Image (spheres, grey):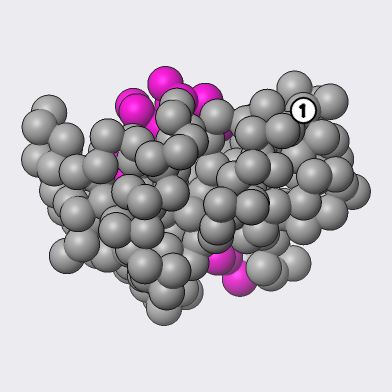
């Protein structure tokens, strides 16, 4: 995921689907709410096929989440993922993504992780789990010695606090799942998801002064 993409899409939904047939209707619901990017996780068996199906949805940028191994990088890229997200930092996962020309957004939680990210040539990382690790205050502290690094907080981010994160110059985007809750997806509540997506985008734009 590139910095311009993060800047253009300040809200990145983290998606868990239980059936591949849910992928495209969900993608359309998000697009209708103004969100044109989504991270489809590999937490279920349906994730990979969901990524594959979303590749044909015009206007949607699809990435893969919960990518844990270099082999999974190969699988998701073959399925059509255009970026990969991991809960932690695994150098081999990052290197494999770089070999394939696909941006990697690994999770970091401390300065040592960030030093490894810098050594791998990364300029952007996921801060996870943001809420448990100190939230905006921790990101602000970590960013001081790592000039030029950008952060996408994930975990504990909500409509109520996204503005606190986006107020930081080093945070161009936030990641969350409240607008794509699993219960809503399984119930086919696409209109509700569109409404939640629109609320999230409006709040993010307001926080960013757009």
Which quarter of the rendering shows the N terminus?
Answer: top right
Look at 84% across and 36% down and name the residue there: 96
Residue 110 drawn above or below residue 64: below
Look at 75% across and 22% down and name the residue there: 101
Q: Is residue 68 magenta?
A: no
- Left or right side of 60 for 198: left
- Left or right side of 56 for 181: left
Q: Who is closer to the viewer here, 80 or 88?
A: 88
**Magenta region:** 1-18
Disc 1: which residue: 98
Image quadrant where residue 104 sits: top right
Residue 20 drawn above or below residue 81: below
Residue at the right extreme of this rendering: 71
The image position of residue 129, as x and y in percent, is 48, 67
**Can residue 17 be seen in the rendering of this structure?**
yes
Residue 159 drawn above or below residue 3: below
The image position of residue 67, as x and y in percent, is 72, 54
Q: Is residue 5 magenta?
A: yes
Look at 55% across and 60% down and name the residue there: 109
Q: Who is closer to the viewer here, 92 or 60?
A: 92
Q: Secondary structure at mark 1?
A: helix
Which quarter of the rendering shows the C terminus?
Answer: top left
């Amino acid at each position: 995921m590139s910095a311009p993409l993060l800047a253009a899409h300040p809200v990145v939904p983290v998606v868990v689907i239980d059936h591949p047939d849910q992928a495209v209707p969900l993608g359309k619901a998000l697009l209708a709410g103004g969100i044109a990017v989504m991270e489809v996780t590999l937490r279920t068996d349906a994730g990979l096929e969901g990524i594959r199906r979303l590749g044909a949805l015009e206007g949607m940028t699809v990435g893969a989440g919960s990518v844990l191994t270099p082999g999974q990088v190969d699988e998701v890229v073959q399925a059509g993922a255009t970026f990969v997200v991991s809960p932690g930092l695994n150098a081999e996962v990052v290197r494999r993504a770089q070999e394939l020309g696909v941006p990697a957004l690994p999770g970091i939680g401390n300065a040592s992780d960030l030093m490894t990210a810098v050594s791998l040539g990364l300029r952007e990382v996921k801060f996870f789990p943001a809420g448990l690790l100190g939230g905006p205050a921790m990101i602000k502290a970590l960013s001081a010695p790592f000039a030029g690094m950008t952060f996408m907080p994930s975990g504990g981010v909500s409509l109520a606090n996204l503005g606190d994160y986006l107020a930081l110059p080093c945070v161009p985007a936030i990641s969350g799942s409240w607008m794509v809750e699993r219960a809503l997806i399984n119930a086919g509540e696409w209109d509700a998801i569109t409404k939640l997506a629109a609320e999230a985008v409006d709040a993010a734009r307001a926080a960013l002064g757009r």
